[in-house]
Structures are given as C-alpha cells and as structure tokens.
Image: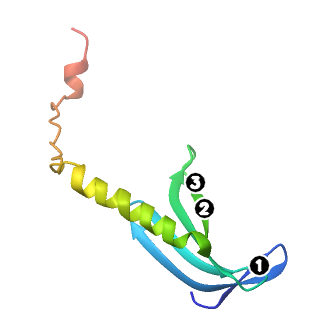
C-alpha cells in the first residue's frame, strides 16, 4: 500500500508505507504516515470481524499512535514482555475436541404412552 493517499478531514494524507499482518481472527495494520511537518509516525491498528445478532458483520478497530521519539522505549518494552512470556509461560498442550455423541431418537419414541 505504499503511497496510498487517504483523506483526513477533507485533506489528502499520504500513507508512506503499510504492512498488514493476519493473526488468527485478528488483522494488525502497521501504517507509516507523515504529519503536516513531514515527521513520520506509526499507527498500529487491530481489526476484528464481529457479527451482530442479525448476522451482519462489522469490524471493531483499536488504534495506537506511536511517534518516533518513543520508538526505542516502545520496542524495548515490547521485547521485554514478549521475552518474559516466552520464558515464564508454561507450554500449553493442544486441546483435543472430543466428538459429542448423540443418541438416535426416532419421532415414534417421543409419543406418549
């Protein structure tokens, strides 16, 4: 999506670079944008597909803005917590889905006696 122009309050805002990462039921969007003074910043958007009761779907989005003066501290903090989880979280065994057994019921069995 390099060079994709996006409108912001009627004004064109250029996305400098964009990367989408699909992870299970979520998609993460990493977008490099520029301020009016041409300073680059990063937006990280988490998008999840949600279904309403009527079956229609919408995307629930959460957005984080990260400015270049915070990149190093953010990356260090993220690395620290990811390393902690990898080191301290016990390996989870895969969950096996057991098939549910159903009893075969005939309509005749439901008649009152």
Q: At 48% across and 76% down in the image, what residue appears?
A: 20
Q: Which residue is drawn at 17% across and 34% down?
A: 102
Q: Residue at x 83, y 80 (%)?
A: 11
* Res 63 label: 2
Q: Is 66 left, or right, of 112 in this rendering?
A: right
Q: How crowded is mark 1: few (under 14 residues within 10 Å), some or many (20 or more)?
A: few
In the displayed structure, does residue 17 sit left or right of residue 25?
Answer: right
N-terminal of the two: label 3 or label 2? Answer: 3
| 3D distance between C-alphas at marks 3 and 2 | 23 Å
Which residue, as the protein is rendered here, is positioned at the far right?
Answer: 10
| Residue 48: assigned label | none
Q: Mark 1 points at which residue?
A: 7
Circles 1 and 3: CB atoms closer than 8 Å: no
Q: Name the residue under label 3.
A: 56
Query: Cβ–Cβ below 8 Å for labels 1 and 2?
Result: no
Q: Position of residue 31 (x, y in %)?
A: 58, 77
N-terminal of the pair, mark 1 or mark 2, is 1
């Amino acid at each position: 999506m390099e060079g994709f122009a996006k409108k912001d309050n009627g004004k064109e805002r250029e996305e400098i670079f964009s990367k989408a990462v699909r992870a299970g039921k979520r998609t993460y969007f990493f977008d490099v944008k520029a301020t009016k003074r041409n300073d680059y910043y990063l937006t990280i958007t988490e998008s999840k597909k949600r279904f309403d009761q009527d079956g229609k779907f919408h995307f629930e989005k959460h957005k984080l803005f990260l400015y270049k003066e915070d990149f190093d501290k953010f990356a260090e903090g993220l690395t620290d917590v990811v390393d902690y989880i990898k080191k301290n979280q016990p390996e989870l065994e895969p969950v096996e889905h057991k098939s549910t057994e159903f009893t075969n019921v005939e309509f005749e069995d439901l008649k009152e006696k």
